[in-house]
Image (cartoon, rainbow, N blue to C red):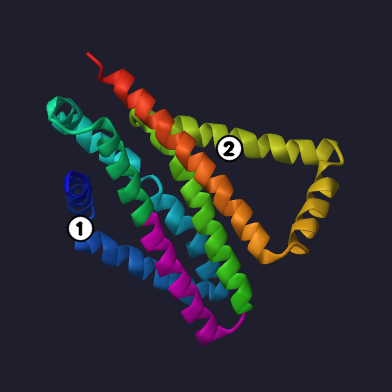
Amino acid sequence: MIVIGLMYKDFKVMIDRFKPANIIAILVVSLFFILLMRGSGATFIAIILPLVVASTPVILQTSDEKSGWDKYVWAAPISKKGIIWSRYLFCLGLIAGTGLFTIIVNILTQIVFQDLPLKLHLIISIVGLLISVLYLLLLLPAVYAYGTSGNTIVSFILIAAVMFFLYAINITNLGDKFIRFVKYLLNIDIKIVCLAIGFMYMVISLFSFQLSLMVYTKKFKR
C-alpha cells in the first residue's frame, strides 16, 4: 500500500505538470506529423515519444527538491527500498503505457497508409521502447546521485559513446563486423533473442536498482 501511495504521489506531480491542454497539444502535433510523413512520422514518434517520457525522473526529482519531499520521506517509517521501488515502477509503467500507445498508433498508421510494412512498424516501436527503458535505467541512479544534472551527465555519456562508435566504424573494420553480427542475430531463433534481451535487461535493472538504493541511502544518511 505504501508503494502504491508513493506512486500516486508521483502521478499527481505529473498531472500537475502536464495539464490536459499540454497532452492535447502533443497529440495534435503527433497527428499532424503522421499526416505529413505517414509511416515515417509514426516510426519517428515511436522512437522519440517514449524517450521523452523516460526523462520523467528529472521532473519528479525537481518536484521532490522544491518541496523537500526527500527529507520528509526519509524521516517517515518507510523502507528505502520501497521509496526507490515505487519510483522505478511508476517510471517503467509510464514508459510501458507510452510504448503501447505508440504501437497502436503505428498499427493504425499502417492500416490507413500502408506505405511501410507492419513488421517494420512493430520492430521500430519495440526498439524505441527498449532504448527508452535502457535510458531510464541509466538515468535514475544518476538523478539520485546528481539531482537534475544527472540527465545532462547521462545524455553526454550516451552521445559520446555514439560518437565514439561512429568514429570507430570510420577508421576500422568495426562497421563490417557489426553488420555481420546483426545478420547473425537475424538468423537466430526469435525466442532465443527475446530471452537474451530479457535476461540482459533484468541484470541491468537489478544493477540500476541497487545502485540507486546505495546512492539514495548514502546521500540522505545522517
Q: Residue 125, how many percent across, how many down?
A: 53, 65
Q: Is residue 113 left or right of residue 23?
A: right
Q: Secondary structure at mark 2?
A: helix
Q: Is residue 48 magenta?
A: no
Camera-side residue of 11 and 222: 222
- Mark 1 residue type: Lys
Residue stretch in magenta: 94-115
Q: Quadrant of residue 222?
A: top left
Q: Which residue is disc 2 drawn over? A: 159
The residue beneath circle 1 is: 19
Q: Amino acid at mark 2?
A: Ile
State the separation of the CA atoms marked 2 and 1.
31 Å
Most distant residue in the top direction = 222
Q: Relative to residue 113, is residue 194 depicted above or below?
A: above
Quick one: 156 or 61, which is closer to the camera? Answer: 61
Q: Residues within 10 Å of mark 2 (few under 14, many from 20)?
A: few
- Determine the image quadrant of residue 98: bottom left
Residue at the spot x=85%, y=48% of the render? Answer: 176
Q: Is residue 111 above or below residue 73?
A: below
Q: Earlier in the sequence, mark 2 or mark 1?
A: 1
Residue 175 spot, x, y in % from top left: 81, 46
In this image, 161 relative to 106: left or right? right
Residue occupying the point 53% across, 51% down: 131
Residue at left 44%, top 62%? 99
